[in-house]
Each structure stands twice: as structure tokens, then as C-alpha cells.
Image (tube, grey):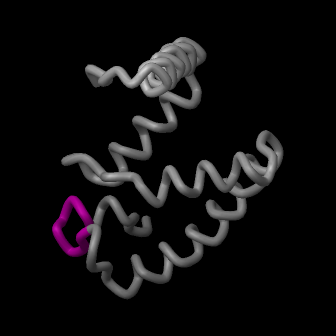
Amino acid sequence: MSRTLYDCFKAKVCTDQILCEACHELEMEMLQEYSDSLIEQIQGKFLAEDIHDLAIGFHSLEVIRYDSRVIASIYSWALSDPNIQKELAERYFQHLKEKLHGEKSTD
């Protein structure tokens, strides 16, 4: 049985910042495949300007105190749940309303 990235993290052989040679090779292979998949999904649902807005959001992303795996799972869950999407849309429109009227957001 081959070792995975998370096996190495658990055994403290690798960290988010430093990978062993085997994990580095695996990460490079997976990165290309998963990046291609992400691009395919985004291009199938968004126009170019929308993709630019998403890129700006990722550029501005401040990763909170959790590791990247947890953050990715949080965003995957939020994007997959229609109720969460509706809640985020309502909060966004409230933000725009407050911005338009010069009110301060309580978020």
C-alpha cells in the first residue's frame, strides 16, 4: 500500500510547507489533474468576467486559522449546498445595500 500526502502529514514526515520527495511528485501530478478539473468546471458555469471576479476573491482570500484541507472542505460544502448559497446571496445583497446607503455592515 502506498503512502498518501495525509499519511505523511499525520506521521509528521511532511507539512503544508515542506513535502518529502515522494509527496512532492504526487502533489505535482495531482495539482495538474485537479487544476484542469477546476478550470473545466468554472468555464462551464461562468463567463470570463465572472472568472476574473473569482480570481480576485481567491487573491484576496485570507486563510483563517484552519489548514487548507479544512478551508477547501468548507468552500466545497458552501458551493454544494443551495441553502448556504441563498444565505450568502442574501448577505451579499445586504452588504451592497449598506454600501449604497453608506451604512456600516455588522459582519
Q: Quadrant of residue 52?
A: bottom right
Farthest bottom residue in view = 21
Q: Residue at x 62, y 60 (%)?
A: 34
Q: Which residues are magenta?
A: 9-15
Question: Which corner quadrant holds the N terminus?
Answer: bottom left
User: Count the marks: how many?
Assistant: 0
Residue 107 image position (x, y, % from top left):
28, 24
Left or right for 58, reference 45? left
Q: Nearer the viewer, residue 91 or 78?
A: 91
Give the main secondary structure, helix, strand or loop, of the magenta stretch. loop
User: Residue at the spot x=64%, y=63% of the render?
Assistant: 35
In x, y percent, where is residue 65? Answer: 19, 48
In the image, residue 7 above or below residue 93: below
State whether residue 14 is above or below residue 4: below
The magenta stretch spans residue 35 = no
* Residue at x 74%, y 47% (from the top left corner): 41
Q: 87 left or right of 42?
A: left
> Residue 79, relative to residue 39: is it above or below?
above
Q: Nearer the viewer, residue 13 or 66?
A: 66
**Is 48 placed above or below 96 here?**
below
On the picture, is 90 further left or further right than 54? left
Classify residue 93 as left or right of residue 33. Answer: left
Please state the horizontal and vertical placement of residue 20, each as a whole percent of the image.
31, 83
Q: Position of residue 54 (x, y in %)?
A: 60, 49
* The furthest residue to the front: 102
Look at 28% across and 68% down and name the residue there: 16
Q: Quadrant of residue 22?
A: bottom left
